[in-house]
Amino acid sequence: MTHNIHVSDFSDFCFGVKRAIRIAEETIIKGEKPVYSLGAIIHNREVVKRLAKKGLKVLDGSPKSVKKGTIVVCSHGVHPDRLKGVKKCVTVVDATCPFVKNAQKIAEKLYQDGYKVVIIGDKGHPEVRSLERFAGNKAVVISDVNEARRFNSEAEKIGILAQTTQANRNFRNILSELLKKDFKEIGIFNTICRDAELRQKATEDLSKKSSVMIVVGGKDSANTRRLYDICKKSGVSAYHVETACEVKEKWLKNKKPVGVVSGASTPRWIVDEVVSKVKGYK
């Protein structure tokens, strides 16, 4: 008997990723060659490979090393300082997600207004690194409740914002801890994007109705890992895969229905391949 399969309504690129891919593809066609992305355009290796075949080279080093062509800023964004020294003959195309742009503006304004900026997010993530730079490289990044409990600052006022793909529950729990501290002024900005919120809620709901969950997305994708964590916390068997070839028949034995969700940087065609693989097991 073929497994019953329920696919989340949020199983494709989010708005920001769709926009970044569109900009990258248009630049490959129309832009001055060669075309580089400043870091991976999104956190999905299969998509990055496809774009590489079309002509988008990932630039991991300094943009100052580019002698000619076009540089596309990845969806996670960068601070303008990162582009200082780029040769005048090199064109820069910005594919930063608009929601990330908004968070950058808030971080910068808080810093300029004298707030100690607190970013609730993943240390080392490209988006978070850019937010830190917009906050004058003086922001504090808090990833979990324990770090929030240990947080101490002599600042009289703090401004709090979130990585745009941060888990809502983690944001609220950390915020609850920070609000216990004795600051004269606290500014709070929930900069989690709507897609992330809806994707997380859909994953939580689907986990409750499924015997096993398959989460599809890049292993280096923070928002995909969060969906996987949501599944695990719900108590259901869960597996994180990048492609259909990773799906194992033993995962599905005596397990139905099967729930399938994807991260915001996962294209629908990869999800469809995973679903086809699951359907092929009897």
Image (cartoon, rainbow, N blue to C red):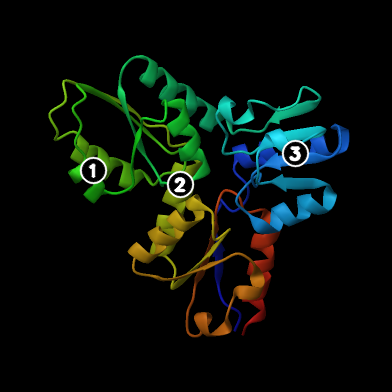
Does 242 sit above or below residue 124?
below
Answer with the quarter of the image where residue 229 lies: bottom left
Residue 67 point in image, percent of width and height: 80, 34
- Is there CB contact under 8 Å for labels 3 and 1? no
Which residue is disc 3 drawn over? 24
Q: CA distance from mark 2 to mark 1?
A: 17 Å
Three-letter amino acid code of the residue under disc 3: Ala
Q: Nearer the viewer, residue 58 or 105?
A: 58
Query: Which quadrant of the rendered structure holds the N terminus?
Result: bottom right
Q: Residues within 10 Å of mark 3 (few under 14, many from 20)?
A: many
Three-letter amino acid code of the residue under disc 2: Gly
Q: Nearer the viewer, residue 204 or 248?
A: 248
Q: CA distance from mark 2 to mark 3?
A: 24 Å
Q: Secondary structure at mark 3?
A: helix
Q: Is residue 269 left or right of residue 155?
A: right
Res. 148 mark: 1
Res. 124 mark: 2
Q: Residue at x 38, y 66 (%)?
A: 232
Does 238 sit above or below residue 119?
below
Residue 185 point in image, percent of width and height: 20, 20
Q: CA distance from mark 3 to mark 1?
A: 38 Å
Three-letter amino acid code of the residue under disc 1: Ala
Query: Which quadrant of the rendered structure holds the C terminus?
Result: bottom right
Q: Residue at x 82, y 33 (%)?
A: 69
